[in-house]
Amino acid sequence: MEKWALVTGATSGIGWATCESLAKQGYSILATGRRPERLDQLKKHLTKTAPTVQFQGATFDVSDRFEVSEFIKEQKSRLEKVEVLVNNAGLAKGIEKMQDANLDDWEVMIDTNIKGLLFMTRALLPLMLQRNSGHIVNLGSVAGRWTYPGGGVYCASKFAVRALSEGLRMDLLGSKIRVTNIEPGMVNTEFSLVRLEDKQKADKVYEGMTPLEAKDIAETIAWCVSRPAHVNIQELVIYPTDQAHVGQVARKG
Ligand code: NDP
Ligand code: 8X3
C-alpha cells in the first residue's frame, strides 16, 4: 500500500525540507500551506528529485476550523493512507514585552501553533486509530521548555505543544500510534522574517553564528519516523553548536 506523509507549513523552511526528506524515504507527500505558488514550486522540485513518489498540495489556513474540515472532506481517501502527520505550520509574531504586545499577534500565535495543531490532529486521529498505525510529529521548540523576555506568548504556545504531545501519548497508550515532539533551537528559515517583519533585523538574528538549517531538523524527523514500530522517540532538543541555551549564543566579531 502507498504510504503518505501529511506535512503542514510545507511552503517554507522546516516543512519544505521535511517533504524532501520524507519523499527520499518513499513517502508520497500531501503538503499544505497558505501560499499556492510555493506548493507548485515544491511539486516541481519533488517531481525532479523524488520522481517515484506522488505529490498533492492543499492551500488552507490550519487555524481556521472550517477550512480544515473542508480539506479533510476533500482529501478523505488520501488521508486514510496518511502514516505520518507532521504538525509543522507555526510562527512567532513580535518580541514586545507583554505589557506592550499586540493582541492580534497573540491571537495568531495561539490560533496557529495550538489550535491549528489540534484541528489537524483531531481530524487525523480516527483514521490512524482505525488502522492502528501512524506517527504524529509535532514541531515544538526550545521555547517550549525555556522562556525568554519578549517571547512569553510564543513560548506558552510551544509549552502547550509539549503538553499536548505528552497528553496525546497517554490517550493513545495501547495503540500503535507514535507521538514525537521535536524541539529545535535557532534554525535559519523565514521564521525571523515573519516574526520581525524586517529583513535586516531578521538577518541580524543569525549574525556571527552558525544556526541550524531546515535540513538538519528534517533529517531528524525522518530518522524518528524510520525507527522500528516499537520505538517512539518522545522528545528531542536540538541546538546549533553555537547556542547553549535560548538566550546564550556564541557570536564571532
Ligand atoms: P517558516 O516561517 O520558514 O515556515 C513556517 C511555515 O508555516 C510556512 O510554510 C507557513 O506557510 C506555515 N504557516 C504559518 N501559519 C500558517 C497557517 N495559519 N496555516 C497554514 N500554514 C501556516 O518557519 P520554520 O520552518 O522555521 O517553522 C516551522 C515550525 O518550526 C514552526 O512551528 C516554528 O514555530 C518551529 N520552530 C522554528 C524554529 C526556528 O528557529 N526557525 C525553532 C524551533 C521551532 P504559509 O505562509 O504559506 O501559510
Ligand atoms: C524558535 C526558537 O529561540 O527563537 O522556536 O524561540 S526561538
Image: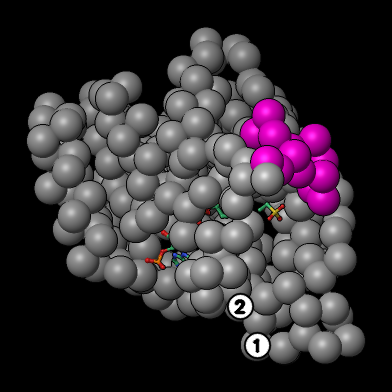
Q: Residue 19's x, y, as percent?
A: 34, 40
Please tell me whether mark 2 sits on a helix, a strand or a loop: helix
Asked if the beta carbon under badge 1 is closer than 8 A to the nearest atom of ligand 1, the reply is: no
Q: Residue 210's x, y, as percent?
A: 58, 38
Amino acid at the residue labelled 2: Val
Quadrant (top left, top right, bottom left, bottom right) of the C terminus: top right
Q: Taking 79 as reference, is 77 left or right?
A: left
Of residues 47 and 138, which is closer to you in this image?
47
Q: In the rendered image of this protein, does residue 124 appear above or below residue 82?
A: below
Asked if the beta carbon under badge 2 is closer than 8 A to the nearest atom of ligand 1, the reply is: yes
Residue of label 2: 108
Q: Residue 208's x, y, as percent?
A: 62, 45
Q: In the rendered image of this protein, does residue 148 appear above or below residue 168?
A: below
Of residues 213 and 84, which is closer to you in this image?
213
Residue 128 visible here: no
Residue of label 1: 104
Q: Residue 126's x, y, as percent?
A: 50, 46
Residue at the spot x=79%, y=66% of the render?
151
What segment is highlighted magenta in the picture?
238-252
Amino acid at the residue labelled 1: Asp
Q: Which residue is outermost to the front?
A: 253
Please tell me whether mark 1 sits on a helix, a strand or a loop: helix
The residues bearing labels 2 and 1 have C-alpha atoms spaced at a distance of 6 Å
Task: Using the image, tell me which numbered label, if any, was put on residue 201.
Answer: none
Residue 200 visible here: yes
Of residues 220 and 227, which is closer to you in this image?
220
Asked if labels 1 and 2 touch by Cβ distance under 8 angstroms, the answer is yes
What main secondary structure does the magenta stretch of the protein show?
loop
Q: Residues within 10 Å of mark 1 (few under 14, many from 20)?
A: few
Quadrant (top left, top right, bottom left, bottom right) of the N terminus: top left
